[in-house]
Image: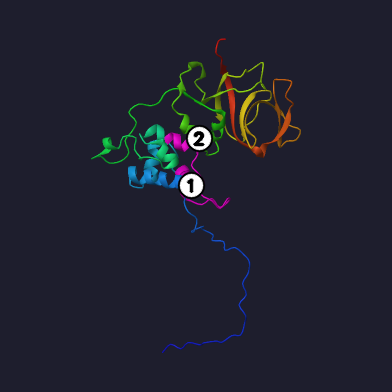
Amino acid sequence: MLRFLILKTTAKIHTFPYKLICPNNIFMKLPELNKRIKQLIDFSTNGVVKKFAESVGLPQQTLNRLFVVDHRTGKYPLATTEILLKITEKYDINACWLLNDEGEMLRNPTAQEGTQGLPYKMTQVKGIPLIPVSAMAGFGSGDMQILEYECERFVIPVFKEAEFLISIKGSSMYPEYSSGDIVACRKLPLDTFFQWHKVYVLDTEQGALIKRIEEGETPDTLTIVSDNQEYKSFQLHKSKIYSIAIVLGVVRQES
């Protein structure tokens, strides 16, 4: 026979003004964009992340991270522009659906009837995408604006290493670069070794900057320099830089 001992207590129950922290963040919702990527994986490879990652040319770990809470931030990581470009370059899906859940998943749903998986693109898009300066953030920080400007591309053989083009606006870099010039850029890692006096495109909390970089006053800062002497140089803390690209060259329209 089991016996139960019942204890009565007069102790008061106290409540504490602390937030409940769940180690695994089981109550956190997966971001809508990540959900749609998961939907693509389920649709194309029956949920096998490894197979889908191989098909788009990404490490499996890169996609796995989208579905696991980052313990450093307590949030799910958002898909980077690189991930989205890899997917849209490989498969013939609707970018508006992927980004904003607008329209159908497939660009041509009727062509998919009676088949399984996602349709591959028949031809690879060639050329370097011309993006507005405002979309520079999308090229490294996870913002998706760049996909909305994928329609305009240019084939420039001399800039084989360029990943995107940006149009110069304003006169801060005159006379080296004039307003309306188009510069070819290549992405660099955030821990890149800067070459002093070279021109870079920086995505910062102040917006995108196309400036010459010099050594900063401290190891944690950079000196941001304009070629136009009317614009003063200033210090920028490295922690305020979200993505970096180096300018490879310029395309200038004959006046």
- x%, y% of residue 200? 62, 26
Q: Quadrant of residue 221?
A: top right
- Place of residue 141 in the rendered image (x, y in percent of width and height, measured from the top left): 55, 38
Residue located beneath label 1 in the image: 65
Disc nearer the start of the sequence (2/1): 1
Q: At 74% from the left edge and 21% from the top edge, which residue is drawn?
A: 230
What kind of element bears circle 1? helix
The residue to which callout 2 is attached is 145
Q: Quadrant of residue 50?
A: top left
**Please, what secondary structure does the residue beneath circle 2 have?**
helix
Dot 2, crowdedness within 10 Å: few (<14), some or many (≥20)?
A: some
At x 45%, y 37%, the residue is: 84
Question: Which quarter of the rendering shows the C terminus?
Answer: top right
Residue numbers of the magenta segment: 61-86
* Number of marks: 2
Q: Amino acid at mark 2?
A: Gln
Residue 82, numbered circle: none
Q: Amino acid at mark 1?
A: Arg
Badges 2 and 1: C-beta atoms under 8 Å apart? no
Magenta stretch: residue 194 in it? no
